[in-house]
Image (cartoon, rainbow, N blue to C red):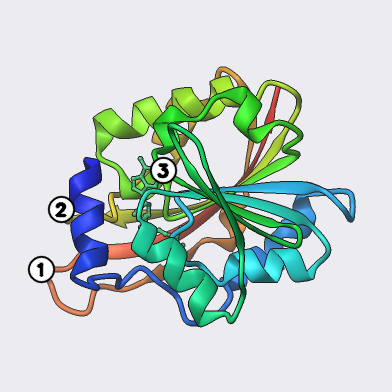
């Protein structure tokens, strides 16, 4: 999924992925990461997710990155926040107490841009990308974080007939292939939630939750 595709979705307000509530898996499983109370959490491909606000409310420092300026500006406007805005050659950066959203391309980030991150929260980032881009994304995440960071990763797995994405189906094998050589993976599979197909053309959809630790 190239950048133009996502820009266009935001321009046309085709944002079915956006949730009006805090993600229940985030609330339930973030404690599994065992983070310090003032940890710094990175949210890749963050959209205008309300999860950012929930994380900040727990006392964490939060940094997101999002390609679409429409999404970033909507996030601050809809939540009645007035960010300080700065700009460099790659990014426009929006900051308000303990919350920073970098507006720009995730693939242009370097380690300096996101120093001091303790954990990553991935909801609808890995599954937003097709196979080729997903591999590139996992390599970038792995190269950016080298110091025992933890990750809460939420994926979706479609069993049976594959639907064209996004969201794309990412099963446990794929997660191990993408991250297994540099991250210790724990699959909370007992917590897998599956929704049966509503009709026979639709695949069954399962939510899967993982915690990872970089080694
Ligand atoms: C499926 S949405 C998920 C958004 C958010 N995580 C949520 O839970 O609502 C994927 C988001 O990634 C953004 N995106 C796609 N490619 C990107 C890139 N290369 N850099 C930064 N953001 C990107 C899109 O604009 C879109 O908002």
Q: Residue at x 50, y 81 (%)?
A: 78
Marked residue nearer the N-terminal end (2 or 3): 3
Instruction: Count how many numbered circles sit on residues in the image.
Output: 3
Q: Secondary structure at mark 1?
A: loop
Q: Residue at x 62, y 75 (%)?
A: 81
State whether residue 16 is above or below residue 112: below
Q: Secondary structure at mark 2?
A: loop
* Residue of label 2: 164
Marked residue nearer the N-terminal end (3 or 1): 3
Marked residue nearer the N-terminal end (1 or 2): 2
Q: Are marks 1 and 2 in contact (CB under 8 Å)?
A: no
Of the numbered discs in the image, which one, if any, rests on residue 104? 3
Mark 2: few/some/many CA within 10 Å (<14, 14-19, 20+): few
Q: Is residue 107 left or right of residue 187?
A: left
Mark 1: few/some/many CA within 10 Å (<14, 14-19, 20+): few
Q: Residue at x 46, y 22 (%)?
A: 139
Residue 178 versus residue 66: which sits nearer the camera?
A: 66
Residue 88 versus residue 144: which sits nearer the camera?
A: 88
From the viewer's perspective, is the residue at label 1 or at label 2 nearer? 2
Mark 3: few/some/many CA within 10 Å (<14, 14-19, 20+): some
* Residue of label 1: 201
């Amino acid at each position: 999924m190239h950048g133009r595709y996502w820009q266009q979705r935001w321009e046309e307000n085709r944002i079915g992925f956006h949730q009006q509530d805090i993600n229940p898996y985030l609330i339930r499983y973030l404690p599994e990461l065992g983070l310090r109370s003032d940890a710094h959490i990175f949210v890749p491909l963050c959209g205008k997710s309300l999860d950012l606000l929930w994380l900040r409310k727990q006392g964490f420092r939060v940094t997101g990155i999002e390609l679409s300026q429409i999404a970033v500006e909507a996030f601050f406007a809809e939540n009645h926040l007035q960010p300080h805005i700065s700009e460099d050659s790659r990014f426009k950066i929006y900051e308000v107490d303990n919350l920073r959203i970098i507006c720009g391309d995730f693939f242009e980030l370097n380690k300096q841009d996101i120093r001091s991150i303790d954990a990553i929260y991935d909801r609808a980032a890995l599954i937003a990308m097709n196979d080729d881009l997903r591999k590139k994304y996992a390599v970038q995440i792995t190269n950016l974080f080298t110091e025992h960071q933890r990750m809460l990763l939420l994926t979706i797995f479609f069993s049976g007939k594959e639907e064209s994405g996004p969201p794309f189906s990412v099963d446990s094998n794929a997660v191990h292939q993408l991250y297994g050589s540099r991250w210790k993976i724990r699959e909370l599979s007992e917590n897998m939630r599956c929704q049966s197909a509503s009709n026979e053309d639709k695949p069954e959809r399962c939510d899967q939750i993982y915690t990872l630790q970089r080694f």
